[in-house]
Image: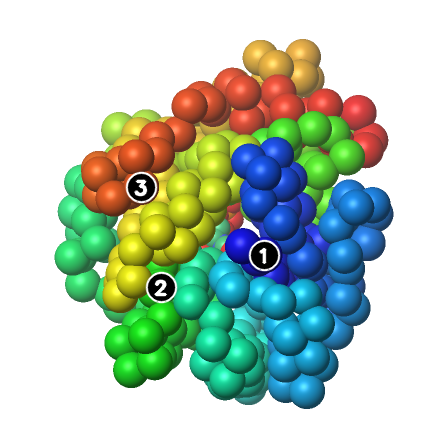
Amino acid sequence: MTWLITGGAGYIGAHVVRAMTEAGEHAVVYDDLSTGVAGRVPGDVPLVVGSVLDGELLSRTLADHAISGVIHLAGKKQVGESVERPLYYYRQNIEGLRVLLDAVVEAGVRAFVFSSSASVYGMPDVELVTEETPCLPMSPYGETKLAGEWLVRATGRTHGLSTASLRYFNVAGAASPELADTGVFNLVPMVFEKLTQNAAPRVFGADYPTPDGTCVRDYIHVADLAEAHVAAARVLAAEHGKDLTLNIGRGEGVSVREMIDEIASVTGYDRAPEVTERRAGDPPRVVAAADRAATELGWKARHDVRDMITSAWEGWPLR
Ligand code: WQD
């Protein structure tokens, strides 16, 4: 079976490509290289440079490579930008998905894995978020992920496509330095940037109703996340009519302060953080109930926060 991996030149996508090929699956990457990097795609994996809005190129790619499964990671993923450019986010993430699904149905593809996000939950008021926790996204980005899940599920049911939407929690780390995240949009790289500029890392609010007053998240190593895709791909390939929605997290809450302490311990840069105002829209606590993915996929995260920080630091360009 050959899998098309859209967004396979991106940070998470390149890890999925590596995990899939190491598991013996055939992969083809489809990426517009807007944020992806061609050099992340292994030489023996075909790379088709194109947009998910280009239905003709998608159809040709699916046919030329005899694709029977798709892992769709291509998309825009910055919450703040999505608030400023909702039309752009809906076009890329929803229209792009619709165009892709049209081509997928036409080509008779059997399995579809969709990259979703914990941001579909918005501000959950629970200790552990289950897949049944109501979804109330707080940004156009989160809305496109939730609506994307609906579109994937409806298409799967109607057109006999086995589907899985994987709700990623907070992704960090790298399987090897050259696959590290090049964006500075999340906590770990933002703290690295400050420390290596000899500045204090920032804590966006320390007056949350959490044990140390800072926000709590469920961090997951990108290599574990990639393995969840391999497991999902195999389950979908083996069984028709699957319709899965799964949290992909570790089920363990870690606060911003705990993350910054661990970063200091790994990097040796021990600078007291500066507490600033809360960032708009940040939920106090988002931690996954991770048991459904374990049951459905036989998958479980293996790496801890220290592994994530150590591997991210090894790939940090300015260290
Ligand atoms: C984590 C915590 C910040 C930087 C977002 C999206 C989510 C997903 C991952 C996917 C928060 C705090 C951060 C800093 C800080 N996106 N922080 N100082 O907001 O949980 O999730 O990214 O594609 O959908 O919403 O992740 O890494 O931005 O922040 O105190 O310099 O760290 O306030 O509490 P977040 P994050």
Measure the alpha-carbon separation of dots 1 and 3: 20 Å
Comes first in the chain, label 2 or label 1: 1
In three-dimensional space, the C-alpha distance between marks 3 and 2, rounded to whole angstroms, equals 13 Å
Asked whether, in this view, residue 190 is left or right of residue 255, the answer is right
Q: Which mark is residue 317?
A: none
Mark 2 highlights which residue?
A: 163
* Residue 81 or residue 182, whichever sits in front: 182
The x and y percentages for residue 238 are 35, 51
Q: Nearer the viewer, mark 1 or mark 3?
A: 1
Q: Secondary structure at mark 3?
A: helix
Distance (Cα) linking label 2 and label 1:
16 Å
Q: Is residue 43 left or right of residue 109?
A: right
User: What percent of the width, then of the height, locates residue 278?
Assistant: 43, 50
x, y percent for residue 128 = 20, 41
The answer to which of 148 and 218 lies nearer the viewer is 148
Which numbered disc, 3 or 2, marks the residue that appears first in the sequence? 2
Name the residue: 30% across, 51% down: 246
Residue drawn at (26%, 65%) of the image: 241
Q: Earlier in the sequence, mark 1 or mark 3?
A: 1
Comparing labels 2 and 1, the label whose residue is closer to the camera: 1
The residue indicated by pointer 3 is: 297
Residue 204 seen in the current view: no
Mark 2: few, some, or many residues within 10 Å (few <14, many ≥20)? many
Say if 115 sits above or below 53 in the image. above
Quadrant of the rendering where the N terminus is positioned? bottom right
The residue pinned by badge 1 equals: 2
Give amino acid for label 3.
Leu
Q: Residues within 10 Å of mark 3 (few under 14, many from 20)?
A: many
The disc labelled 1 sits on which kind of residue?
Thr
Q: Of helix, strand and loop, which one carries label 1?
A: strand
